[in-house]
Image (cartoon, rainbow, N blue to C red):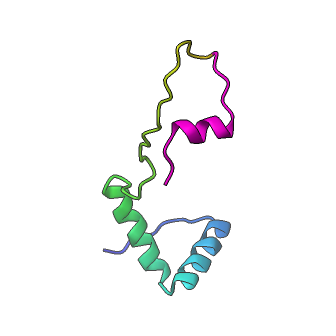
Amino acid sequence: MRTTVDIPDPLYRQLKRKAASEGRSVNELILRGIKTELQGGSRGRHQYVSLPLIPSGSPGTGSLDNARIFELIPFP
């Protein structure tokens, strides 16, 4: 199906540059964007991160420096 969409000139120039840098056509990029949007934007924009918790006897009163953080949290 053909349709017409008005894209502001600056945005279209960005789109053309991105398409060229990826070796794709503007049409391919637009279709990829539409598919991503219809699939619920599954590009990972809303990923939740589980942060480590540091136990404290009096929350909000502790002072942490980098050395203490490295003692409490195992880093790879």
**Residue 32 in picture, x, y percent from top left:** 39, 70
Please name the residue shown 38% across and 63% down the image. 34
Identify the residue at the far bottom of this view.
Answer: 23
**Magenta part of the chain:** 61-76
> Is 66 placed above or below 12 here?
above
Could you tell whether 58 is left or right of 1 in the image?
Answer: right
Foreground pick, 27 / 72: 72
Q: Is residue 75 magenta?
A: yes
| Number of numbered discs | 0
Q: Is residue 20 left or right of residue 1?
A: right
Nearest to the observer: residue 50 or residue 26: 50
Q: Quadrant of residue 49?
A: top left
Measuring 57% from the left and 73% from the top, which residue is drawn there? 15
Q: Quadrant of the N terminus?
A: bottom left
Which residue appears at 54% of the width and 65% of the height? 6
Q: What's the residue at 61%, 17% (across, down)?
A: 60
Point out residue 53 in the picture as x, y percentages from the top left corner. Answer: 47, 30
In the picture, measured across the screen, residue 42 lies left or right of residue 14, that is left
Q: Residue furthest front?
A: 71
Q: Residue furthest top?
A: 58
Question: In the image, is residue 42 part of the stretch drawn in magenta?
Answer: no
Q: Front-most of 6 and 17? A: 17
Q: Position of residue 27 (x, y in %)?
A: 44, 78
